[in-house]
Image (tube, coloured by chain):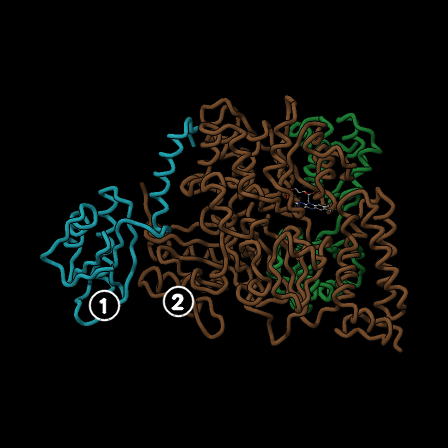
Chain colours: A green, B brown, C cyan
Amino acid sequence: MESEKIPAVDKEIRKWGTKHESLIQVLHGTQESLGYLPEEVLTYIAKKMNVSLSKIYGVVTFYNFFKLTKDAEHVITTCLGTACYVKGGEAILNALCNRLDIKPNEITKDGRFTVRTVRCVGCCGFAPVMVVDGKDIHGKLTPETAIDILEKYM
Amino acid sequence: MKTYRIHALVCAGTQCLAAGGNGFKDALVEELKQHGLTEEVLIVETGCMGSCQLGPRMVVYPEGIMYTRLSPEDAKEIVEEDFLKGRPVTRLLWKQDEKQFLTLHETPFFAKQTRIVLRNCGFINPEDITECIAQGGYESLARCITEMTPKDVIKIIKDSGLRGRGGAGFPTGLKWELANKQISDTKYIICNADEGDPGAYMNRSVLEGDPHSVLEGMAIAGYAVGAQKGFIYIRAEYPLAIKRLEIAIKQARMSGLLGKGILGTNFSFDVELRMGAGAFVCGEETALINSTEGKRGEPRKKPPYPVESGLFGKPTVINNVETLANVSVIIEKGADFFRQFGTDKSPGTKAFSLVGKVNIAGLIEVPLGTPLRTIVFDIGGGIPEGHTFKAAQTGGPSGGVIPAKHLDIPMDYENLPQLGAIMGSGGLIVMDETSCMVDVAKFFLKFTVDESCGKCVPCREGTRQMLNILEKITSGLGTMEDLDLLEKLGNVIKQTSLCGLGQTAPNPVLSTLRHFRDEYIAHVKDKVCPANVCSMKAKK
Amino acid sequence: MEKIKSIDELRRLKEQSQAFLKTRQKDVKVKIYISVDKEENTNASRDVLLAVLDELKERDFSDFQIIEKAPMGSDIKEPFMALERDDLVIYYSNITPNMAREIIVSHAIKGQIVSDWVSKRSNL
Ligand SMILES: Cc1cc2nc3c(=O)[nH]c(=O)nc-3n(C[C@H](O)[C@H](O)[C@H](O)COP(=O)(O)O)c2cc1C
Ligand code: FES
C-alpha cells in the first residue's frame, strides 16, 4: 500500500488497539485524517486487526458516515430533519442542487462541490439548517441566503 | 481567591455558535481589553440556555440581564453602557408582545418551566469541573459510595418513579434492580447518547452544557448495579458534545471522581466514549450494543434482554442521557422532591426541543403532564405570522401527531399513547396549516425506509410498500382501498418486526390517518392537497 | 487539578468554588450598590468602585455582589454607595474612595454600619 497512508492508520490502531470492538473507532479516526476510506487502507486494517475484509466492508457500508470514495472539496450538507423539513429544508436542498447543476449526493464535474442531506444536526431552533464542510453551520436559511453562502466558497 | 464583579455568560452551545456566537465573544474580549476591564469581568462560555432562536445570547450577572441576537458590533455598547455604567442596553433585551424583559426568569418562556435536568445548562462553564462541584456536582455520588448500599440507591430511584427518558419510559429503578441481581464479575453501564430522532437535541444540550451530570449519573448507576465500566455511545454528528465530554471525563479522572478507588473508597468506575457512525437504528439498545462491539448495528432478538446479556454478553444497563442526568438530583433531594413534579405515574420533568412553526423555538423543560397548549402557546409564544396551529408531532419516526382538537392533552407517558402518539425522546415539532399531513407521514416513512437496517422482512419490505402507496396518494393516484391497505399493512409491520424501529415505523402514518383522514380523502377523492404541498400530478 | 480523596475534601472544594460563583448566585451576604450613571461623575464613581474592589480583594472577602446603580434622586449626593446586608439597606452619599474602603471594612465585612456617613436607611 502507498506508504503515506499507513501512519494515519497505525496511529489509530495504536490508540484503540486491535480488538475487534475498536474497528468503528479506528475507521472514524482513519477517515478523519484521510478524508475517506480507500480500499487499500481497508485491506491494511483487515490484516492489522485480523478481521476479514468482507466484515470490514459490512461495517463500512452499514453506516452512513463512512465513505469509500474521495469526497468533493466542499461538502454541503442540508438538513432534512423534521424541524428543517417543516421549515422548508427541501427548498434549500433544491436551490443548492440547481445552482450546482447536480443531484443530491453527486459531485460536481470539477470535483469541488457535493450536496448531501442529513437528518438533524441538532440546531433545530435555527431551521432550516445547512452545514459546510462538517463545521460551518448556517441557519434560518432561505433559498437565496443559502445560495449566497454557497457562492462564497465558489 | 480571585473574584470578578461581573460574570458574562455567553452561550457556546452549537446553535448559538452557529448563529455567530464566537464572533460576538471575540469582540467582547477585545472590548474588555480596550476598556481595561479584564480584571473585573469574567467571560464564561456555557452550554445551551434554551431559547435558541434568540441566539447568540448572553446573560450578565449579578443581575442576570439577558441579551439576545447579539452581533460583534454590540459588544462595544454593552461594555460601555452596561459594564461601565450599569445601564442595560434595552435594544438587545428580549421582546415579546410589545413587552421587554430584563432577565430570563421574567419571560413567559421561562415562567412555566421547571429545570431539573437542565439545572446547570447555561449557568456553569461545562469545561470546568469546579463550577460543577460548586453546584453540588458529584456530592450525590460521594454520598452513595460512602453512606449508602447499592440497594439503598436502587430503592430511592424506584421510589422516585423515574422512567427512562429515551422513549419507552421503562422504570429506571427496576432496570437497575434487575441488573443488580445478575451474578457476573463484569457488568456495564451504557449511556445512550445517539439521539436519533430528527428534530430533537435535548441530549446534545445536556452533554454540551452539563456533561458531569451524566457522568455522575453513570457512576451512581455503576455503583447500584455493580458495574465498573461505562460507555457513552454518542452520535458522530455532535462534535462539540464529544469534545466537552472528553474534557469532562479527563477532569473527573484527574480529580479522582472517575477511575480506581473513587474518593478513597474501594468503588472504581471509569467511562469511555464510543462514536456512532450515522445509523438511526443504533439508538435501539441491542443494535447499539452491536455497534459498541464494533459490528454492524443490527438489532438482536430479545430476550435475552441487555440486563441479562448485553455488551460482550455481560449484564448491561442502558440508559438515556436525560434519565442519567436526573439521577444525582433524586439522590440529593430525595424521591419525594422528585415526585412533587409531574404526575403520579409519570413523575418528574421532561425536556423537549420545541421547534417548527412556533415563535420561540428552543430547549425547554416542563413537569410531565403539562398540557400541550401551555408548551406551544405560553412557553413557545404561539404560531408565527398569523398562522394557526394544526398539529404537533412527538416521538419522531416512531411517534404520531396531536391535532388542535387535543391541545389540552397532558404530555405524559399515559395520555400520549391514547392518541396514537408517544412521548419519545422529546422532539416536539409544531406544524401550522401549511403542512400537509400526508406529506408529513411520507416524510417519516422515507426516513424509516432509509434507516431500516434490512435484517427483517416486515420492516424492510413493508415500509417500502407503505411508502409506495403514500407516493401514489400524494401524486393524486390513490384510491380509497389504499387507505385501508395502509392501515392493514401498518398493523402487520407493527406486530411482526424484529425491533422497535419496525414495530413503531407505521405510527406516523396510522396516527395521521386517524386524526386527519379527511386530508387523505381529499388527496384520493378530490385529487387536491388542501395544504398545497403535494404536487398532485394527476388532477381530477 | 488534584485528586479529591474523601467526601469531606469534596465538600471543602465545593465551598471554595461556591465563593467564586457568588456573582452568579441569588443569595449573597452583601450587595454593594454603586452609582455610576451621571456622566460628570463617572470618574469619581469609578474611583470608588475600584477602591471597593481593591479593598475586598485585600481582605479576601468574596461573599458579595456589586451592582451598578442609576442615581437615587436629588436627596442623595453622588457618588453614592449603598450596602444591603442583614435585610437592611444603608445609603452612603457623597463618598470618596477612602470612605468607601472604610465602609467595606467595617460595614460589609464586619457588619458595623458607619453611622456618621449614613444618609438614608430602609428595610428590604
Ligand atoms: C429505532 C429506535 C431508536 C431509538 N433511539 C434512541 C435514542 O436515540 N436515544 C435513546 O436514548 N433511546 C433510543 N431508543 C430507546 C432505546 O432502545 C432504549 O430503550 C433506551 O436507551 C433506554 O434508556 P432509558 O430507559 O433511560 O430510556 C430507541 C429505540 C428504537 C426502537
Ligand atoms: S431538524 Fe434540522 S437541525 Fe434538527
Question: Residue B36 occupies which quadrant of the picture?
Answer: bottom left
Where does label 1 land, which residue? C72
Both labels 1 and 2 in a single chain: no
The amino acid beneath tag 1 is: Met
The amino acid beneath tag 2 is: Val
Which quarter of the figure is the N terminus of chain B placed in? top left
The one nearer the camera, B9 or B348, is B348
Please state the chain letter of the residue tagged with numbered disc 2 in the rendered image: B
Going by the image, does B100 lie left or right of B467?
left
On the image, the x and y values in percent for residue B283 come to 70, 44
Is residue A5 at least partly visible in the picture?
A: no
Q: Nearer the viewer, mark 1 or mark 2?
A: 1
> Could you classify mark 2 by the number of other residues whose Cα lies within 10 Å: few (under 14), some (14-19), or many (20 or more)?
some
The answer to the question of whether label 1 and label 2 lie on touching residues, with beta carbons closer than 8 A, is no
- Which residue ends up furthest to the bottom in the rendered image? B540
Which quarter of the figure is the C terminus of chain B placed in? bottom right
Residue plotted at (63% across, 74% down): B387
Depicted B124 relative to depicted B410: above or below: above
Residue plotted at (42% across, 55% down): B30
Could you say whether the residue bearing mark 2 is in a helix, strand or loop? Answer: loop
On the image, the x and y values in percent for residue B353 come to 60, 56
Going by the image, does C41 lie left or right of B419?
left
Question: Residue A141 occupies which quadrant of the picture?
Answer: bottom right
Where does label 2 land, which residue? B89
Going by the image, does B92 lie left or right of B434?
left
Residue plotted at (75% across, 58% down): B508
Please state the chain letter of the residue tagged with numbered disc 1 in the rendered image: C
The disc placed on residue A94 is none
On the image, the x and y values in percent for residue C103 come to 17, 52
Could you say whether the residue bearing mark 1 is in a helix, strand or loop? Answer: loop
The one nearer the camera, B497 or C77, is B497
How far apart marks 1 and 2 lie (CA) works out to: 20 Å
